[in-house]
């Protein structure tokens, strides 16, 4: 079955406990200045109810019907209103598109992004349902094939070999709590580290390179540099997978890295280029979109 997307016919495929050490404390502080350890309350994740009422234009009759039972914050009520707003304003006007997506998907792009709540790839890059196959993890890391299976490389395998995506994007961002945790971690710590610490240590090479080149800079400046170095390492790690490397060589797949700056809403991007003469790969074509 074929489906035309972006001018090209494509094949369709159906379908904690908080560890209060310095490293995780840094991760949570970086993620949100309003987040307190151990207080993952819904009221801190969503805008206040009055704002949502104004945004959705909820009638007074709805408010009256909920005042007796709603004493503080109606999390599920807001989720219901958001869903119904999506159905009314997005789904129904494009019902044929969504019914086609219910049968199969044919994304052109695979995105590896960070789990950070402030950086949703589809929101920032404007992807619509069905356009981008996405996996997110702490610090948007891609480990090399020799490190074994992860949820990220399993998603990559499906996207590349089954969905046959043509572009892979590794998307990082500024003020990344995962990279701050990496930079804070003491390298000699081992088996007593938390899950987060053990995961972000997959970016150790970027950390050591950053420390060597910018030891004279402040911790925050080093983190900004490491965030970019880590993206470049993840881009290069993609080539360790033969089913990606072979497709990059033939031009079937293109690999990109991008860095979203939360402070000024700019995007720095790179592309992975192959050197056909010596069978190598390198990062090139740096651009800044602002």
Image: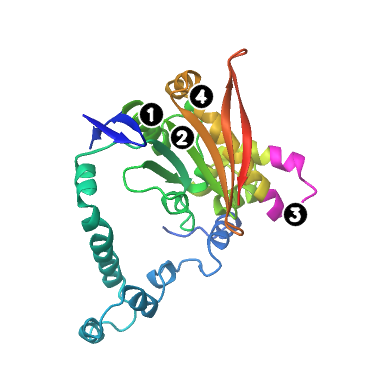
First along the sequence among labels 4 and 1: 1
State how far apart marks 3 and 4 are (Cα). 33 Å
Horizontal and vertical percent position of residue 212: 75, 39
Query: Residue sitting at 51 percent across and 39 percent down?
Result: 170
State how far apart marks 2 and 1 are (Cα). 9 Å
Indicate which label's residue lies in the foreground, 4 or 1: 1
Residue that numbered label 4 is attached to = 240
First along the sequence among labels 2 and 3: 2
Toward the viewer: 58 or 244? 58
Residue that numbered label 1 is attached to = 160
Label 2, secondary structure: give it. Answer: strand
Query: Residue sitting at 31 percent across and 43 percent down?
Result: 130
Residue that numbered label 3 is attached to = 218
State how far apart marks 3 and 1 are (Cα). 40 Å
User: Badge 2, how many Cα within 10 Å: few under 14, some, many 20+?
Assistant: many
Label 3, secondary structure: give it. Answer: loop
Q: Is residue 96 visible?
A: yes
Q: Can residue 194 be seen in this view?
A: no
Query: Residue sitting at 24 percent across and 43 percent down?
Result: 101
Q: Along the horizontal axis of the image, is 290 left or right of 90?
A: right
What range is drawn magenta here? 209-223
Query: Residue sitting at 56 percent across and 29 percent down?
Result: 272
State how far apart marks 4 and 1 are (Cα). 14 Å
């Amino acid at each position: 079955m074929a489906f035309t997307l972006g001018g090209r016919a494509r094949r369709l495929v159906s379908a904690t406990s908080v560890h209060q050490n310095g490293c995780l404390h840094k991760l949570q502080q970086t993620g949100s200045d309003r987040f307190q350890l151990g207080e993952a309350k819904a009221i801190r994740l969503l805008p206040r109810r009055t704002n949502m009422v104004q945004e959705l234009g909820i009638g007074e009759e709805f408010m009256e019907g909920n005042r007796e039972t709603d004493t503080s914050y109606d999390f599920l009520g807001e989720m219901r209103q958001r869903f119904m707003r999506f159905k009314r304003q997005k789904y129904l006007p494009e019902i044929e598109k969504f019914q086609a997506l219910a049968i199969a998907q044919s994304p052109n792009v695979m995105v590896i992004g960070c789990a950070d709540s402030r950086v949703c790839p589809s929101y920032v890059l404007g992807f619509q349902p069905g356009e981008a196959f996405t996996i997110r993890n702490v610090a948007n890391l891609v480990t090399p094939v020799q490190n074994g299976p992860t949820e990220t490389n399993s998603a990559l395998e499906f996207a590349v070999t089954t969905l046959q995506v043509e572009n892979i994007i590794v998307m990082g961002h500024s003020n990344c709590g995962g990279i701050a945790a990496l930079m804070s971690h003491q390298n000699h710590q081992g088996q007593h580290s938390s899950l987060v610490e053990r995961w972000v240590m997959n970016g150790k090479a970027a950390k050591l390179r950053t420390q060597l080149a910018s030891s004279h800079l402040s911790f925050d400046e080093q983190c900004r540099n490491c965030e970019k170095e880590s993206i470049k390492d993840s881009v290069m790690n993609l080539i360790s997978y033969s089913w990606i490397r072979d497709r990059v060589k033939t031009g079937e797949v293109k690999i990109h890295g991008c860095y979203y700056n939360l402070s000024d809403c700019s995007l720095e991007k790179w592309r992975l280029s192959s050197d056909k003469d010596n069978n190598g790969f390198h990062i090139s074509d740096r651009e800044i979109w602002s």
